[in-house]
Amino acid sequence: MNDLGWIDAVVAGVRPQVMGALLRYFRDLDTAEEAFQEAGLRALRTWPQNGPPRDTAAWLILVGRNAAMDDVRKRARQTELPDEAELSDLGDAEASLADRLDGEHYRDDILRLLFICCHPELPATQQIALALRIVCGLSVGQIARAFLVSEAAMEQRITRAKAKIGNAKVAFETPGAPERAERLAAVAAMLYLIFNEGYSTTLAEAEARAPLAEEAIRLVRLLLRLFPTEPEIMGLTALMLLQQSRAAARFDGDGNVILLEDQDRNLWSTSDIAEGLALIDKAMRHRRPGPYQIQAAIAALHARAECAENTDWPQIDLLYANLERLQPSPVVTLNRAVAVSKVKGPQAALDMIEPLGARLQGYFYFHGVKGALLQRLDRNDEAREAFRRAIALAHTPAEAAHIRQHLDRLSS
């Protein structure tokens, strides 16, 4: 880390609190963002000489707010901001603000910021882009590279999202308990979408997109600090960590996909696994199961198995059955069918997924799973057709290459 790197790290760490408070003051995303940037610049100028303030978030909020108000005053030809020396030694003003910005106050500001980014009028792609820009502070260029679009296109996407929020006259007051509970689910879903944008990537895209998974984990940890007794947030955090623990083992040197059962488990991150297992165990003790907890429990069973052969497939089948009841979906049933094939054989699994064909005809994984089941039943002509359909629907070259390996084995 360079000489000023510690300042960048500190400022980035408190960005959600500071942006949330500035948004409450100014009720405008652009103004809050400009105020935060100005406060960050002031920190770079003054902290190397004076050291960081006692409460860095409070300092940045006060300086950012004053800078934005000064801009308004200048436009109105009014009083200018105090000089740099006065700002660098905030004294009692900083202490007073820190006293008012206790943990509960920060919590409300961060929630408001996250809730605004996942406003229901925004499509998921705009929610994610806006959260990465406003909450995480990623540059437009970084976000554009992650989504494989041009900077101009991403700039337009973020601008549209801000405009929709402005036109919707979003309430900036702290939401009540019922609305907070409803929106918490939306925030959790948005964070999981961000995670999947980074995790569901190819080896070639990893450098650009993998940071999204890391940002999602950072934000969900923040959400967990805000809701430390909420088992679904524990479950979501555990789910992300357990999935992320396998990142280094997901591709071979040529960029080909390695299935979970074939991965080198020595490459899995033991620290991520340990943290994820502790969280899901803690969540389950609350006896309030939810979809994220169940998915994390499934991931935990894979993590606990020393080798693929020791995987507790009957328990995974039961967990997927519970997930089907809580969150009915053809994709959940398709995933359960994989577990069923391990427990009851390929024919039972094939019988389970056949009714899903109409709804999943355009889904890559449906045809891949169907082809694998048919192959195990020696119904090779039907398997070839399913694999060809999967290749046609593949989203990435790595997906297509993986299915082609199966197809080549049928032809050999």
Image (cartoon, helix red, strand yellow):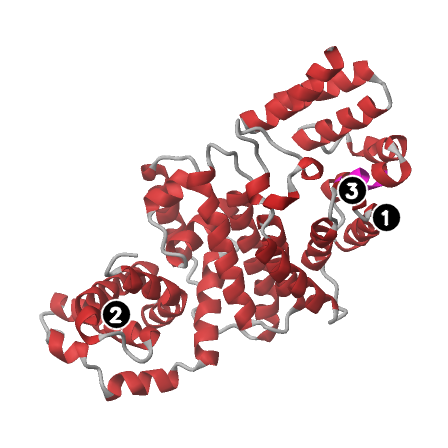
**Which of the two labelled residues, at mark 2 and mark 1, occupies the earlier sequence position?**
2
Percent across and percent down for residue 385 are: 74, 17
Secondary structure at badge 1 equals: helix
Split into 4 quadrants, where in the image is the N terminus? bottom left
First in sequence: mark 1 vs mark 3:
1
Gap in angstroms between the C-alphas marked 2 and 1: 56 Å
Quadrant location of the C terminus? Answer: top right
Amino acid tagged 1: Pro
| Residue at x-position 71% and y-position 65% | 281
Which residue is located at x 43 percent, y 82 percent? Answer: 102
Q: Is residue 84 visible?
A: yes
Place of residue 306 in the rendered image (x, y in percent of width and height, measured from the top left) = 73, 48
Q: Residues within 10 Å of mark 1 (few under 14, many from 20)?
A: some
Q: Magenta segment, principal secondary structure?
A: helix
With respect to residue 310, does 354 lie above or below? Answer: above
Q: Dot 3, how many residues are within 10 Å of its Cα: few (below 14), some (14-19), or many (20+)?
A: some
Res. 378 mark: none
Mark linked to residue 333: 3
Label 1 vs label 3, nearer the camera: 1
Quarter-wise, where is residue 398 in the image? top right
Give the residue type at disc 2: Gly
* Mark 2, secondary structure of its residue: helix
Work out whether mark 3 precedes mark 2 in sequence or the reverse, and give the earlier one. 2
Q: Name the residue beneath numbered marker 1.
A: 314
Residues at circles 1 and 3 in contact by the CB criterion of under 8 Å = no
- Label 3's element? helix
Instruction: State the image quarter where residue 409 is shown.
Output: top right
Residue 350 point in image, percent of width and height: 85, 31
Name the mark on residue 64. 2
Dividing the picture into quadrants, the one containing residue 176 is: bottom right
